[in-house]
Image: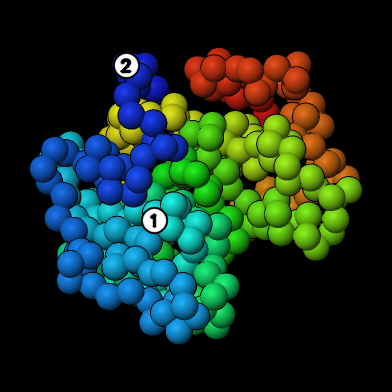
Amino acid sequence: MNLPQPSPPSRGPSFYEATARQRVNRLLDAQSFTEFLPPQGAHSSPHLALLGLPGALDDGVVIGSGTLGGKPVLIIAQEGQFLGGAVGEMHGAKIVGLLQRAVRDKPLAVLFLVDSGGVRLHEANAGLIALSEIMRAVLDTRAAGIPVFALIGGVCGAFGGMGIVSRLCSAILMSEQGRLALSGPEVIETVAGVEEFDSRDRALVWRVTGGKHRYLMGDCLALVEDDVEDFRQTTLALLAHWEETAPELHTLRAEQERLSQRCTQFCGLRDGLEVWAALGVPNPQQIPLLERDALVTLRQGLSL
């Protein structure tokens, strides 16, 4: 699916630097957002309190309804600045409840602003169960014909279980600053050693998990600027062209075959530079320096 590229916006608020509520209010139509379970009517996680850790009355996630281009949508926005956007029991319950409401109310789409390092280890099994419930709820929502779009461009990216959740969504939009992977760089370094992956090498981290790499690999549908307005315009374009259908067996098998071929094609490669060269990119070292539009043009010439 090729989305029409919106006109370059005037430089607006950074999606990466904004809080969850700022992203929501700037993404949706002005004055259209209604928050469900706002801080004044919610409670902090009891698990964090038992551990003597500070909580947040929204438990690090904002949920609600609004309009985008005049069309009804439901929205989820994780707050990466609270415990790294990690998923705990209450955090997960809010997300699951919002997705269940989507199945009932039939909005045009659910927008999932992912900004999370994964599960909240403080809550152990409760957090893991919450993640599994989110995964099931995303699939249930899609099966009901309601697309779930993941927007990734926050400070924490989408790692761990939330990386899996993102890939279960109907489509992913990412900025260059966004990151998407299963295991985070620090986790890989802790388990396998700095020789395997140096988490302090920021250039390496973005070459392996960042938005440009994910776009070239076909893991996200569109690469957008680090600008809330660009996320908004790209999402509007996506909504105008999207018609959700439940995945059929032959499409799932085709996707599995594509992933299997990718494992063979890139086996043993350790850096985005090597992967980009294997994709046929003429000057892989130039990728981090390319502007968004130039990268989009380059990808259109690749055989993926």
Q: Quadrant of the C terminus?
A: top right
Residue 11: image quadrant is top left
Q: Secondary structure at mark 1?
A: strand
Residue 164 appears in the picture as rendered: no
Position above or below: 146 against 277: below
Q: Name the mark on residue 219.
A: none
What residue is rendered at 36% in x and 40% in y? 18
Q: Position of residue 187 (x, y in %)?
A: 71, 59
Residue 153 image offset from top left, x and y in percent: 47, 40
Q: Which residue is mark 2?
A: 10
- Residue 263 visible (yes or no): yes
Distance, label 2 to label 1, CA atoms, is 26 Å
Residue at 78% in and 29% down = 273
The residue depicted at 50 percent of the width and 17 percent of the height is 293
Q: Position of residue 235 (x, y in %)?
A: 33, 37
Q: Is residue 71 left or right of residue 128?
A: left
Task: Please identify the quarter of the rendering in which residue 229 is found.
Answer: top left
Of 291 and 12, nearer the camera is: 12
Q: Amino acid at mark 1?
A: Gln
Looking at the image, residue 281 sits to the left or right of residue 72; the answer is right
Residue positioned 41% across, 37% down in the render = 17
Q: Position of residue 144 (x, y in %)?
A: 31, 65
Residue matched to label 1: 78
Q: Residues within 10 Å of mark 1 (few under 14, many from 20)?
A: many
Crowd band around label 2 with a 10 angstrom C-alpha radius: few (<14), some (14–19), many (20+): few
Left or right, 178 with respect to 38, comes to: right
Please identify the residue farthest to the front as the structure is shown.
52
Q: Secondary structure at mark 2?
A: loop
Task: Indicate whether 6 appears above or below 236.
Answer: above
Note whether 292 is above or below 97 in the view shown.
above
